[in-house]
Image (cartoon, rainbow, N blue to C red):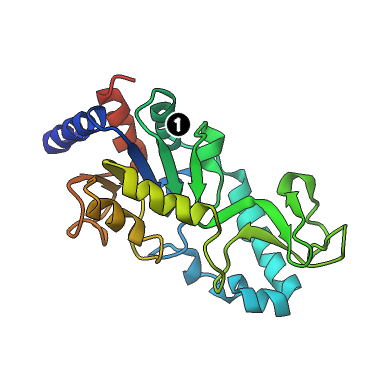
Amino acid sequence: MDKNIQNLIGKAAQAIRGAQRVTAFSGAGISVESNIPPFRGKNGLWNKYDPKFLEINYFMLHPKESWELIKEIIYDFFGKAKPNSAHYALALMEKKGFLQAVITQNIDNLHQEAGSENVYEFHGTSQKLVCLDCGRSYLINDMSLEKLPLLCSKCGGLIKPDFIFFGEPIPEPAASRSFMEAELSDVFIVIGSTGEVAPASQIPHLAKNNGALIIEINTEESGFTHSITDIFLKGKATEMMTALVKELKL
C-alpha cells in the first residue's frame, strides 16, 4: 500500500480511537464491490434504464410495468448480492465499540447482513413492502413475485417496495435520526458516496458544521473531498476498511 495512504490510515485510526461517537455514512460505492452497480455515473443503471419507472406517479399509473423492472433489477439481480469486507469491517467496528451507527443511502440490506445493528436506512429498504392503501407491511421473503403487480391480501390495494421513489419524502424516523447522528458525532466516515444526491448529501456537511472530523473513502474525488473532508483515503472501500480495522487492531 502507498506509504502516504498508510500514514493517513494511521491518522484516521488515531482519530477513531480518541472519538466519543463515530458514525459511518455509506453510499453506492460500498456495494459496488458486491456487484451492485450504482444508479448514477459511468456504469450507472440510469444509463441503461429510464428512471421514470421509480417515479411514484408513474408507479401509481403503470404499476405492472414498474414492478416488472423492479423485480428484474432490485430483486432478481441485486438480491444475489452478498456483503463484502467493507460491510464486515463496519460491523466489527460496531461490535468492538469503535462505531456507534451507520447511515446508509443504500437499500440493499448488506450492512445488516454483515452484522451491523444500528443502521439508519435513509432511503428505505428493499426488504420490506407496504400497501399504499391500508399501510400493511410485508417482508419480501414472504412474497411471490410471479404475478405482478403485487396486491394487498388484506384490502386489495397496490403494494410497493418500502424504499423511496422519486417524488416521495425521506422516511421517518430514519431522516431525523440520521441528522441527529450527524450533530452528535465527532468522527464521521464517508464511504462510497459522491455527495450528489440531496438531501442525503447534507448529512456529512451537518456533521462537519458541528465539529466532526471527516474521513472519506472513495475511489475518486467527490463533492465532499475539497469542501469538508479532513482525511481522504483514496481507494476501494474493501481495501481501505480492511486496512483501517487492522490499524485499529480489531
Residue at figure coordinates x 22%, y 29% from the top left? 18
> Image check: 128 left or right of 236?
right
* Picture quadrant of residue 156: bottom right
* Left or right for 11, reference 160: left
**What residue is shown at x 87% (from left), y 63% (from top)?**
155
- Mark 1 — residue? 91
User: What element does badge 1 sit on?
Assistant: helix
* Vertical position of residue 8 compared to residue 212: above or below: above
User: In this orientation, does residue 204 appear?
Assistant: yes
1 horizontally vs 108: left or right? left
- Which residue is drawn at the image coordinates 39% and 22% (left, top)? 96
| Residue positioned 61% across, 44% down in the render | 80
Q: Position of residue 105 (x, y in %)?
A: 46, 54
Between 193 and 44, the residue placed more toward the observer is 193
Most foreground residue, 110 or 173:
173
In the rendered image, which quarter contains the N terminus? top left
Task: Please count the marks in the image.
Answer: 1
- List x then y, in percent, for residue 142: 78, 45
Q: Is residue 29 visible?
A: no
- Furthest toward the top, the residue is 249
Task: Note whether 54 is above or below 97 in the view shown.
Answer: below
* Spot occupied by residue 90 in the image (x, y as percentages of width and height): 40, 34
Instruction: Specify the quadrant that holds the C terminus.
Output: top left
In the picture provided, is 224 more to the left or to the right than 177?
A: left
Neighbours of disc 1 within 10 Å: few (<14), some (14-19), many (20+)? many
- Residue 92 position within the rendered picture, expressed as x and y whole percent measured from the top left: 42, 27
| Frontmost residue, 240 versus 59 | 59
Q: Quadrant of residue 168?
A: bottom right
Q: Amino acid at mark 1?
A: Ala
